[in-house]
Image (spheres, helix red, strand yellow):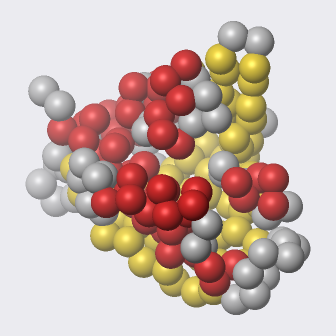
Amino acid sequence: MTERALLLALLLLAAVRPAAAEVLDQSSTGFTLSNTVTVAVPPQQAFDALVDAVDQWWPKDHSWWGQEGRFRIEARAGGCFCERSGQREAQHMRVIFVDPGKLLRLEGGLGPLQGMGLSGVMDWRLAATDDGGTTITLWYRAGGYTPEPLGDFVAIVDQVQAQQLGALASHLDKP
């Protein structure tokens, strides 16, 4: 395991709120992940926080520029999930489908996947619960060619996504 991967794994252990995480499938060319959490706010409120408050809840240790990075999601087809720090900019993913309160779909590769030649489709799926809350599922399918063995880091990517979903859930739990 590389030093960076080890550091990333240790940071994950300090995640504030765990989500149910699962590697649904994986092969030498791709993988599918699913992470789920339930929050006590209605779907539209959860969706609004997902897109409008991303800079408040997205973990800064998963930023190109740490605390200096500012995140935004333009919730429209073709919109950007971007990060900016002064003159530095990064497009993390591109929005390809928006159904407010129900689904936000993005495409691209997050973090190191981007530079490895891997890309994917990420769904943030929101479903109302019987008690007025929301079940949020973060689903991600990624693939492409890379000489790196995917099996070495699929579990780490899954844990990072669980941390990201947990951060959104913790943000939604604040009074």
Relative to residue 82, is residue 133 depicted above or below? Answer: below
Where in the figure is residue 151, as x and y percent of width and height? Answer: 63, 83
Q: Is residue 35 visible?
A: yes
Q: Residue furthest top?
A: 86
Relative to residue 159, is residue 100 depicted above or below? Answer: above
User: Viewer-proximal residue, 85 or 22?
Assistant: 85
- Quadrant holding the C terminus: top left
User: Viewer-proximal residue, 149 or 103?
Assistant: 149
Relative to residue 126, is residue 148 depicted above or below? Answer: below
- Residue located at (70% from left, 68% from top): 142
Where in the figure is residue 21, as x and y percent of width and height? Answer: 38, 71
The part of the image, by quadrant, that contains residue 154 is: bottom right
- 37 on left or right of 31: left
Where in the figure is residue 34, as x and y percent of width and height? Answer: 47, 71
The part of the image, by quadrant, that contains residue 44 is: top left
- The number of callouts visible is 0
- Residue located at (17% from left, 31% from top): 174
- Residue located at (81% from left, 53% from top): 115
The part of the image, by quadrant, that contains residue 75 is: top right
Relative to residue 135, is residue 164 depicted above or below? Answer: above
- Quadrant holding the N terminus: bottom right
